[in-house]
Image (cartoon, rainbow, N blue to C red):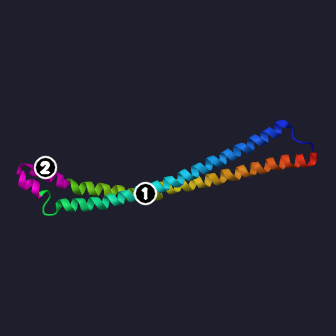
Amino acid sequence: MSSPEPSARRFAQQTSQEHVALDHKLEQLHRTTEQLQQLWLTWQEQLRQLLKFLQGHFAAEERGGYFCHVVQHAPWLKEQVDRLHAQHEQLHHQLDQLAARAEHAQVELLAPMVEQLAQWIHQLQQHEQQENRLLQEAFTQDMAEGD
């Protein structure tokens, strides 16, 4: 066998450079995925903290009668106070449902996508390794035999 032609060497070199660039892009995607997962966990924790805070906030407003000082000072506002008081339970319930859905969403949506992506990356990396071995076998044997 003879030594590889210049065009074949350029092809091997270009393919090798593209594989390095691809590895870099996969590493960036991996880091972003990890950040996404961490941000998701942070978001879930912030929802839980807000829910806990809101529960205490509403309880403090309702202690001694909801906005009793407002009603004592301005009795004509009682209807508005009652309407706002009634919204507490609804607002708390809605946030509670959202937080519960967020807890399950990571397991139901994000985790499977991350796993699928990891499997796909593994398949792609195996494919790229096979291509690299093919190039190395083709061109290193040609070069060794050409010497």
Chain part drawn in magenta? 68-86
Question: Toward which corner of the image does residue 41 lie, by quadrant?
Answer: bottom left
The residue lying at 66 percent from left, 49 percent from top is 23
As drawn, which residue projects farthest toward the top? 7
Residue 106 place in picture, x, y as percent:
46, 57
Circle nearer the N terminus (2, 1): 1
Checking the image for residue 22, the label placed there is none
Left-right relation of 81 to 126: left
Tell me which amino acid carries mark 1: Thr
Q: Quadrant of the N terminus?
A: top right
Looking at the rendered image, the disc whose residue lies closer to the viewer, 2 or 1, is: 1
What is the distance, in whole Å, between disc 2 and disc 1 at their CAs? 36 Å
Most frequent secondary structure within the magenta stretch:
helix
**How many residues crowd around disc 2 within 10 Å: few (fewer than 14), some, or many (20 or more)?**
few
The residue lying at 92 percent from left, 42 percent from top is 2
Residue underneath mark 2: 80
Residue 45 place in picture, x, y as percent:
39, 59
Residue 32 place in picture, x, y as percent:
54, 50
Residue 66 place in picture, x, y as percent:
14, 58
**How many residues crowd around disc 1 within 10 Å: few (fewer than 14), some, or many (20 or more)?**
few
Relative vertical location of residue 5 with respect to residue 63 in this rendering, above or below? above
Question: Toward which corner of the image does residue 101 lie, by quadrant?
Answer: bottom left
Checking the image for residue 42, the label placed there is 1
Q: Is residue 10 magenta?
A: no
The residue lying at 49 percent from left, 55 percent from top is 37
